[in-house]
């Protein structure tokens, strides 16, 4: 089993990475492989609804890491999406990144990369804006049939530097418990597959408010 952790910070080894690393460490202790994937610092264009992904099976914009991440996502069993807080919201980079990753992934012959796989959000802030950012990231999973993994507090850490994050005892403990909950859920899914359990999916109804 493998969990793919997305670092949506412009700082590769900053506070968000520190929180994700704590999650990864405990997952590894539970015999689950991990990879921390950094979105980088290049500009990330948002989805412009060109719909070319319906023809290509991937996002038509290929000057960043979105398609690379989605290819890895098909092989992953679970996800953790991490972002620092910018103006009480997730970074513009990870917002654009996830918008294209989630929208474009379901159009290829391989099916959806994220559906039915557990995911979690992790948020890092110096002081405030965590809850709004946490809710924002969870919405990507909530519309994609992904079980959302939580901890015994909202998945957030505080600190202005990686060293300060490690001093946030409750936040770091929350990261560790999140990893344990993720590991448990993945093992439950694996046990269900061994017993032949499958998801039942009802055909999706699509309605418009204006006719």
Image (tube, rainbow, N blue to C red):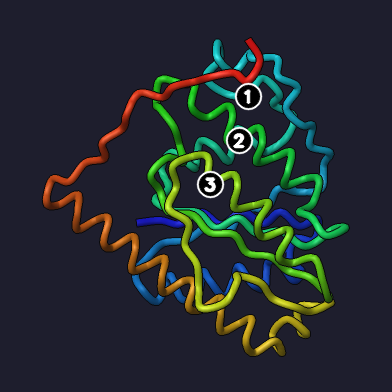
Residue 204 falls in image quadrant: top left
- Disc assigned to residue 170: none
Tell me the mark number nearer the camera, choosing from 1 and 3: 3
Residue 166 falls in image quadrant: bottom right
Of callouts 1 and 3, which one flags the residue occurring earlier in the amino acid sequence? 1
Q: Position of residue 33 (x, y in %)?
A: 41, 61
Q: Considering depth in this image, is 118 or 67 the residue closer to the camera? A: 118
Q: Is residue 111 left or right of residue 191?
A: right
Q: Is residue 204 left or right of residue 168?
A: left
Q: Are marks 2 and 1 in contact (CB under 8 Å)?
A: yes
Q: Dot 2: within a 10 Å radius of its alpha carbon, few (fewer than 14), some, or many (20 or more) residues?
A: many
Q: Residue at x 80, y 62 (%)?
A: 85
Can you say whether 53 is above or below 190 in the image?
A: above
Can you say whether 177 is above or below 103 in the image?
A: below
Q: Are marks 3 and 2 in contact (CB under 8 Å)?
A: no
Residue corresponding to mark 3: 141
Direction left: furthest residue: 195
Alpha carbon distance from label 2 to label 1: 8 Å
Q: Considering depth in this image, is 142 or 94 the residue closer to the camera? A: 142
Q: Position of residue 199 (x, y in %)?
A: 26, 40
Q: Position of residue 128 (x, y in %)?
A: 82, 71
Q: Residue at x 71, y 65 (%)?
A: 131
Residue corresponding to mark 1: 59
Q: Considering depth in this image, is 136 or 79 the residue closer to the camera? A: 136
Q: Regarding mark 2 in the picture, which secondary structure is present there?
A: helix
Residue corresponding to mark 2: 101
Q: Regarding mark 3 in the picture, which secondary structure is present there?
A: helix
Of callouts 3 and 2, which one flags the residue occurring earlier in the amino acid sequence? 2
Q: Is residue 35 left or right of residue 98?
A: left
């Amino acid at each position: 089993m493998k969990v793919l952790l997305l670092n949506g910070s412009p700082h590769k080894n900053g506070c968000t990475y520190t929180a994700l690393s704590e999650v990864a460490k405990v997952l590894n202790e539970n015999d689950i492989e991990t990879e921390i994937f950094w979105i980088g610092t290049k500009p990330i264009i948002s989805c412009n609804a060109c719909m070319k992904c319906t023809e290509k099976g991937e996002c038509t914009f290929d000057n960043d890491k979105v398609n690379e991440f989605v290819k890895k996502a098909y092989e992953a069993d679970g996800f953790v999406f991490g972002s620092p807080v910018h103006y009480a919201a997730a970074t513009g980079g990870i917002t654009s990144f996830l918008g294209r990753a989630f929208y474009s992934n379901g159009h290829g012959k391989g099916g959806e990369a994220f559906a039915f796989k557990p995911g979690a959000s992790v948020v890092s802030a110096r002081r405030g804006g965590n809850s709004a950012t946490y809710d924002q990231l969870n919405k990507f999973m909530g519309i994609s049939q992904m079980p959302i993994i939580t901890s015994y507090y909202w998945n957030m850490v505080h600190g202005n530097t990686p060293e300060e994050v490690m001093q946030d005892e409750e936040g770091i403990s929350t990261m560790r418990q999140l990893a344990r909950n993720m590991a448990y859920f993945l093992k439950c899914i694996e046990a269900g597959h061994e017993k032949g359990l499958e998801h039942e999916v009802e055909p999706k109804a699509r309605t418009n408010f204006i006719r």
